Amino acid sequence: MYSIGIDLGGTIVKIGLIHSGKIIGFTVLDANSRKGLESNLPFIEKAINDLLLKESIEPSQLSGIGLAFPGLVNPIKKTVISTNDKYDDACDLKLDVWVKENWAVPFCMDNDSRLAAMGEWKYGAAKGRNNVVMMTIGTGIGTGVIIDGKVLHGEHFQAGSLGGHFVVDYKARRCTCGNIGCVEALASSSFLPVIIKDNKSLTPEFKARADEYDFKEIFSLANNGNSDAITIRNECMNVWSAAIVTYIHAYDPEIIVLGGGIMKSSDVIIPYLKERVDKLAWCPSGKVNIVVAQEGDNAALLGIEHCLINVKEKKHETIY
């Protein structure tokens, strides 16, 4: 059986046709998440049908369709609970009905970072481990957690998925979530211009270009010895380290998996984080390994396949 995974990002929608842990068909759509999800559904529907047609697959051959959403999700009721400036109309949509009317197959949905953690747990860098934290660093910062071989959800389905909103400096700037001093507000792509403008130690010339920089350029400039870029790069890595220390103290994982496009600079990031986390985390039983995600941007799609397998087999690898 095949499955379809839909991964909703802030600027793009990724759609994959999946079979036995492998993505055999893939397409990407532009998406303005601030315009909502409903306006994107016709384009997603067409992309799915085009994928099925291209691979000569009938809907009857699908085990189901799954959705990775960048917000809080109730995976039991298959509804979106809360959004944060992305697809803000999603709470009012009946996506399970949309799937049933178009393809008549089972449907699952969950938080995107939680599904990415499932993908790396079952098919990637954390395969065979029972206690896992995945941290995705990008426009925002998300996390997913596996404890004792079960996916963590919690009372309100937000446990493990709000790692970007752990407070690492309660006197710092306000985050989009309304809290103060979140990891995401101090070291994510969406806040990078503000992070640069607020840093009093940077040169005026560097700060004047704050809106033009992304992490790719920051790391490139830092590698070439630019002192301003080194300052921003290292301060962000210090924030990520503080977050990881907190995840270790909260969840006691065997392994931390790091994902997101920024991990193209893993040769700098991983050694830096390991050294700092090893010094600061209270781990008397041994160091926690920090590794790069193997499945990259496809992890959430593979997590969807695992989610659908659980639905079909009525497994309960979940802590609610």
Image (cartoon, grey):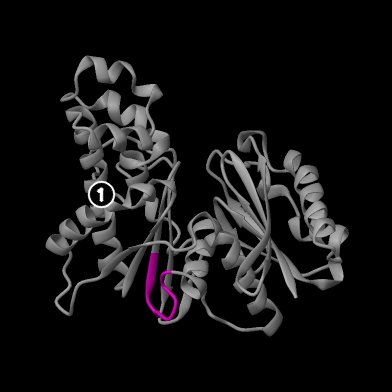
Q: Pointer 1: what residue?
A: 268
Drawn side of residue 114 relative to residue 237, left or right? right
Q: Mark 1: which secondary structure?
A: helix
Q: Is residue 64 left or right of residue 145?
A: right
- Pick whichever, 89 or 28, lies toward us: 28
Start and end of the magenta stretch? 125-133
- Can see residue 157? no
Q: Residues within 10 Å of mark 1 (few under 14, many from 20)?
A: few
Out of 155 and 317, give the one closest to the viewer.
Answer: 317
Q: Position of residue 1 (x, y in %)?
A: 75, 76
- Check disc 1 and give the amino acid type: Val
- 126 part of magenta stretch: yes
- Asked if one can make out residue 205 in the rendered structure from this viewpoint, the answer is yes
Residue 275's image quarter?
A: bottom left
Q: Residue at x 75, y 38 (%)?
A: 39
Dominant secondary structure, magenta: loop
